[in-house]
Image: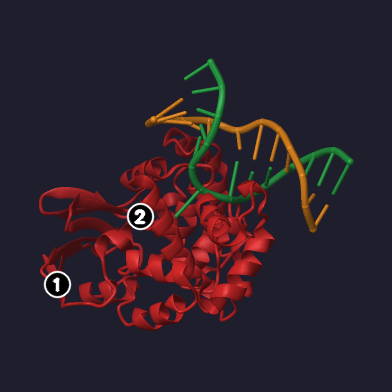
Chain colours: A red, B green, C orange
DNA sequence: TCCCAGGCGGTAG
DNA sequence: CTACCGCATGGG
């Protein structure tokens, strides 16, 4: 059993991080406890006073030789613990009262640095789908093609590497309930495995545009999915993925078009860029979480 | 029963 | 270039 303690962190709230719509593999156990899978590690996080206790298990993955990261370094990287959010928050809060309020509401949000490959497949599955079903499909993929990890007597499954997922035929994927996304996942897996699209190369690019261009070559990756991947796996904080919630909150706050659906993407992107400058991606997460949670309650 | 869900790819104008 | 439409599936 691995263990790591994070003492009194700034800008760190489990519910804000895991429920703000960026990830699919974390499950709430109770108010102060979540369990999730990062690469080939099962991780449990529990809040205790102002500290966070991480426990878990790592399995050595026979297929990849480069996953020799320690428990601590997996967590530090994934939660991006070296980044100081107070600077972002300070900058964004000054923009207007909406940002100020949304940041107060979701003060503990952090943008995770998720695995690129997993993020690509997950967001291809997200197309024209709902979050509970997206999570179910991903769990099935992991159960069938991932590796088993035992933690506290329970079985968990890692997200399969491209080699493992390439064993699935289109029909196999259809059986898992992917629907019309089966062919897209199949084709994308092949393209990545053959390095027709080279994920390592993408990680090393320094231009967001170049990265996006590469991602768009993948079947099932369009503008929205590409932006989610850029933000949630490659930490491009300047991108602005537009979904129905973001469109809604931006229209409500800034545009006031009677017909929300008429607000076009280009207009939204330009507005976001001019308002939030290089921090559109983070601003979007605060606004998204604020508006969505507000809608759930009263 | 119908409608929708964190779009995309294809086709037509 | 923009505008639409079909797409599998499960839940409300």
SS under mark 2: loop
Q: List x then y, in percent, for residue A5.
A: 14, 74
Image check: B7 left or right of A285? right
Secondary element at tag 1: loop
On the same chain: label 1 and label 2?
Answer: yes
From the viewer's perspective, is residue A283 above or below residue A26? below
Decide which of A38, A189 is in the foreground and name it: A38
Q: Nearer the viewer, residue A170 or A182?
A: A182
Quarter of the figure that contains the N terminus of chain A: bottom left
What residue is rendered at 22% in x and 76% in y?
A: A72
**Which chain's residue wears label 2?**
A
Q: Point out residue A124 in the picture as x, y percentages from the top left corner.
A: 52, 51
Q: Which residue is mark 2?
A: A159
Query: Circle 1 marks a residue in which chain?
Result: A
- The residue singled out by tag 1 in the image is A50
Q: Which residue is depicted at the point 52% across and 41% down?
A: A182
Badge 2 density bin: few <14, some 14–19, many ≥20, Cα 10 Å: many
């Amino acid at each position: 059993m691995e263990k790591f303690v994070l003492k009194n962190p700034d800008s760190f709230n489990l519910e804000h991080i895991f429920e703000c719509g960026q990830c699919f593999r974390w499950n709430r156990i109770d108010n102060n406890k979540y369990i999730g899978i990062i690469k080939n590690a099962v991780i449990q996080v529990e809040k205790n006073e102002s500290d966070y206790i991480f426990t878990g298990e790592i399995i050595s993955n026979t297929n990849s030789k480069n996953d020799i990261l320690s428990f601590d370094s997996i967590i530090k990287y994934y939660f991006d613990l070296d980044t100081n959010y107070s600077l972002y928050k300070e900058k964004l809060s000054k923009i207007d009262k909406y940002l100020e309020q949304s940041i107060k509401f979701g003060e503990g949000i952090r943008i995770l640095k998720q695995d690129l490959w997993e993020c690509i497949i997950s967001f291809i599955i997200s197309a024209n789908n709902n979050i509970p079903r997206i999570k179910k499909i991903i769990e099935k993929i992991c159960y069938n093609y991932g590796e088993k990890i035992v933690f506290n007597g329970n079985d968990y499954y890692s997200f399969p590497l491209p080699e493992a997922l390439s064993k699935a035929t289109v029909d196999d994927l259809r059986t898992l309930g992917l629907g019309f996304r089966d062919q897209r996942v199949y084709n994308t897996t092949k393209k990545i495995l053959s390095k027709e699209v080279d994920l390592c190369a993408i990680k090393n690019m320094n231009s967001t545009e170049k990265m996006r261009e590469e991602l768009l070559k993948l079947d099932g990756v369009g503008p929205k999915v590409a932006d989610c991947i850029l933000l949630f796996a490659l930490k491009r904080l300047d991108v602005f993925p537009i979904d129905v919630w973001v469109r809604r909150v931006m229209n409500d706050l800034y545009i006031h078009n009677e017909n929300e659906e008429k607000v076009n993407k280009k207009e939204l992107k330009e507005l976001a860029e001019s308002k939030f400058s290089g921090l559109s991606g983070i601003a979007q997460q605060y606004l998204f979480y604020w508006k969505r949670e507000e809608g759930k309650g009263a």
